[in-house]
Amino acid sequence: MNYQNYVDGPQGGSSNPRQAPPSPSQGMTHTNGMNGGMGPGASLVGYPTPAGHQSDLNYVMSMVDELSGILRINQQLTASVVDKMGKVREKAKHLNLSNDELITVVANEMNENWKLSIHGAEILADIAEKMHRFKEQHEADTLAWHKNYRKQLADEREENLNLRNQINDMKAAACRANDGLRQMRRFVGDNDKWHELEVENHRLRTEKRFWKRLALPLIPDNDSEWSDDDDLIDPEEKIREAAKREKERKDKEDSGSGIGSEQVS
């Protein structure tokens, strides 16, 4: 806020209600040599004011502004009261009411307004109570949901742990079985006794087959007596040999029947 006009403004003319009165420090002689005592009065024109004068002026003007605000509020309140009184007078004039009747009507209106205020307060209280109940129920439901979710999560983790343990047990059992198979195969392959028994078995079966075929020359090759030959001849090969022999037999029969028909003709 600029208060320079209150210091250097003219003294004459129309008076400004916001203009401060002249400072008592102006025109007075001071012992510090600021406004007098050091020369004639004509030489003191335009000399700077004392240091505390501007601060005092600012304080006074702030008090004036504060009082102006208070007066403005009081003026508004007074205008509101006068306006309401005018409305009451107009109402009484139009309705032709006496003072007691007018007071009764105003009291009834105030009572109605009070009842409306009480009703509104009750509605707000009911809304607040319902909101509190809703919040309590929502928090309870949320806590129950979180508890159930944590329980389900714990059950799923436990089930997952059990499945992983079962898988680990199966892997361990498979490893043990594989290790047992490797040991058995290593035992059979590295043990000379098993190899000697296999060689001896093959030799004995070969010797037995030789003596049987030597002693039974009239038994055909496809007889079941020679079933011990399965270790030397593949069963599928025996089937193919039988099919080949059957085909050769049919070819011989067909060729024989063709020769006989030609001789008859």
Image (cartoon, rainbow, N blue to C red):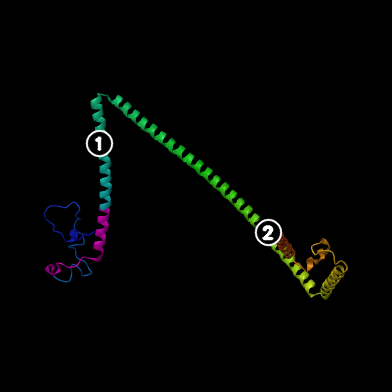
Q: Is residue 115 magenta?
A: no
Q: Quadrant of residue 224?
A: bottom right
Per the image, the residue denoted by label 2 is: 262
Q: Which residues lie in the magenta part?
A: 40-64
Task: Give the mark toward the camera: 1 or 2.
Answer: 2
Residue type, numbered disc 1 = Asp
Say which residue appears at 79% left-offset and 71% top-offset. Answer: 188
Per the image, the residue denoted by label 1 is: 83
- Disc 1 from disc 2: Cα separation: 151 Å
Q: Earlier in the sequence, mark 1 or mark 2?
A: 1
Give 14 or 185, whichever is nearer the viewer.
185
Residue at disc 2, secondary structure = helix
| Local crowd size for mark 2, using a 10 Å CA cut-off: few (<14), some (14–19), many (≥20) | few
Give 237 or 134, whichever is nearer the viewer.
237
**In the rendering, at what x and y percent does residue 178 appear?**
73, 67
Q: Is residue 49 magenta?
A: yes
Q: Quadrant of residue 5?
A: bottom left
Give 84 or 47, whichever is nearer the viewer.
84
Placement of 64 over or under 84, stated as above or below: below
| Local crowd size for mark 1, using a 10 Å CA cut-off: few (<14), some (14–19), many (≥20) | few
Placement of 89 over or under 171, stated as above or below: above
Task: State the quadrant of the C terminus.
Answer: bottom right
What secondary structure characterizes most of the magenta part? helix
**In the rendering, at what x and y percent does residue 182 appear?**
75, 70
The disc at residue 124 is none
**In the rendering, at what x and y percent does residue 181 appear?**
75, 67
Placement of 87 over or under 232, stated as above or below: above
Say which residue appears at 79% left-offset and 75% top-offset. Answer: 190
Residue type, numbered disc 2 = Glu
